[in-house]
Amino acid sequence: HPAIEALTFDERLAQLIDRELLLRDSKRIERLLKAARIKVGGACLEDVDYRAGRGLERSQFAALGTCHWIRQAQNCLITGPTGSGKTWLACALGQHACRQGFPVLYQRVPRLSDALRIAHADGSFGKLLAQLARIDVLILDDWGMTPLDQAARHDLLEVIDDRATSRSTIITSQLPIDHWHAWLNDPTVADAILDRLVHRSHRIALKGESMRKKQPEKPNNDDPS
């Protein structure tokens, strides 16, 4: 190609290196996104709906978009009523973190509790805890959705304690934060968990009616028009 022939050897080598770096970065992001198992794959910060009444501030998401909170091992606590977009926002933050090179994992709290209980039974509990502790951003969805027994409460404390001051956690919950202590239903464990989560956190309290009601209706394929 004439344009290539006009370049010096150093310039051509620089282009090859740049292309290789871009390819490796692209493959790494692809691996991170696949491993994250994010529930809403299409969620992204650029599409956040800031309409009045939702309780969202552009300045807060601009700060979260820098990922400085992840580097500082801070948490993000998202609360709000059913359908307000909690899971979508958590997934958008997770997607953005992956694209910035941070390992992410999405987990629903009820399923995580089941996985931890099974790990106790088959002897892999320590290995699972170590895996979770290495994840830079752990998304815990549906926090407070179902009651926890004593074993599940202690397992959750182990997960949170391993991450405190070293990794970031995103939590979504229908329960306001001041109701979490009652949901955990054990003063000692609740104090320990909340102390590790709440004091180093960014809080997003969503408001308004369900976003699902505002989605456009699907076209009727039977309509001849």
Image: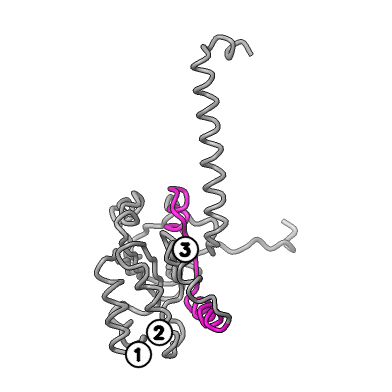
Residue beneath the point at 44% across and 71% down: 140
Callout 3, which amino acid?
A: Trp
- Tell me residue 106's x, y (percent): 49, 65
Disc 3 crowd rating (10 Å Cα; few below 14, some 14-19, many 20+) is: many
- Tell me residue 57's x, y (percent): 30, 58
Depth check, mark 2 against mark 3: the one in front is 2
Q: What number is the disc on residue 88?
A: 3
Q: Are marks 2 and 3 in contact (CB under 8 Å)?
A: no
Depth check, mark 2 against mark 1: the one in front is 2
Disc 2 crowd rating (10 Å Cα; few below 14, some 14-19, many 20+) is: some
- Outermost residue, left direction? 199
The image quarter containing residue 150 is: bottom left
Q: Which residues are magenta?
A: 92-121
Of marks 2 and 3, which one's residue comes earlier in the chain? 3
> Disc 2 marks which residue?
153
Q: Disc 2 on helix, strand or loop?
A: helix
Asked if the stretch drawn in magenta spans residue 98, the answer is yes
